[in-house]
Amino acid sequence: EDKVVQSPLSLVVHEGDTVTLNCSYEVTNFRSLLWYKQEKKAPTFLFMLTSSGIEKKSGRLSSILDKKELSSILNITATQTGDSAIYLCAVEGAQKLVFGQGTRLTINP
Amino acid sequence: EAEVAQSPRYKITEKSQAVAFWCDPISGHATLYWYRQILGQGPELLVQFQDESVVDDSQLPKDRFSAERLKGVDSTLKIQPAELGDSAMYLCASSPFSSEPYEQYFGPGTRLTVT
């Protein structure tokens, strides 16, 4: 059965800190890995990763995929209170997205 | 900017009652998904449509849940009868194709509370 595990489940840091969120997966017929941000509503798309070792970057957020280790990390530098959210990792296999349980990130001022 | 529409946004119902949720995907998106997200967990796929056909409903509790997308555009998810454990956020998403790794666009969700 396809499985996606995120860690940590919860993280509390101070504004300005850098955080790293982890996602590991076991999926047959891997096609892509996606990161979403969820703030009390529907998930909003952040990144899609298909190739190993190529970093995707958007402002203070970046992500990279390691197909050998079956994992991905999401980095957020110089965190702001607006980064507080649940970050979801999802892996696409066999035309279906399997989500992890999410990491709840809280940024304290 | 095109968005996935869902209604209602919130629904409170008593157990054993019937409820229905509606989703209108982004225009031109052939693939539509219904997810259930229980508090503290990630979304779980209930059913996937490609146009009007069901591609995957392996996780849909078919004794009480049903979904349809009759004309291949908007879709309805129904629960009858609702149970306390059905309390969750029901998310609809759409994507242009199912044969390529495209990101899915999510609607605002329907938050269901069963009392």
Image (cartoon, helix red, strand yellow):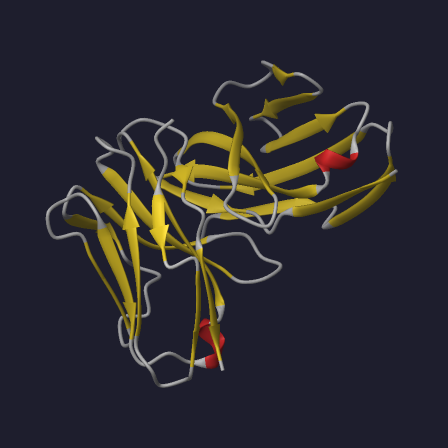
User: Which percent across, then down, holds residue B41?
Assistant: 58, 57
Kindly indicate the quadrant of the structure image that contains residue B15: bottom left
State the residue lying farthest toward the left. Answer: B71
Quadrant position of the N terminus of chain B in the picture? top left
User: Which percent across, then down, holds residue A6?
Assistant: 65, 45
Kindly indicate the quadrant of the structure image that contains residue B86: bottom left
Q: Relative to B80, say whether B106 is above or below.
A: above
Kindly identify the residue that appears in the image at 61 percent across and 33 percent down.
Answer: A71
Of residue A28 and residue A104, the one placed in the foreground of this image is A104
Kindly identify the residue that appears in the image at 79 percent across and 45 percent down.
Answer: A11
Kindly identify the residue that appears in the image at 62 percent across and 59 percent down.
Answer: B40
Kindly indicate the quadrant of the structure image that contains residue A19: top right
Q: Relative to B107, say whether B114 is above or below.
A: below
User: Which percent across, then down, holds residue B37?
Assistant: 50, 58
Kindly identify the residue that appears in the image at 55 percent across and 19 percent down.
Answer: A52
> How many labels, in total?
0
Q: Relative to B80, say whether A97 is above or below.
A: above
User: Which percent across, then down, holds residue A29?
Assistant: 39, 35
Of residue B63 and residue A46, the one placed in the foreground of this image is A46
Of residue A56 and residue A80, the one placed in the foreground of this image is A80
Judged left or right of residue B109, residue B21 is: left
Judged left or right of residue B107, residue A25 is: right
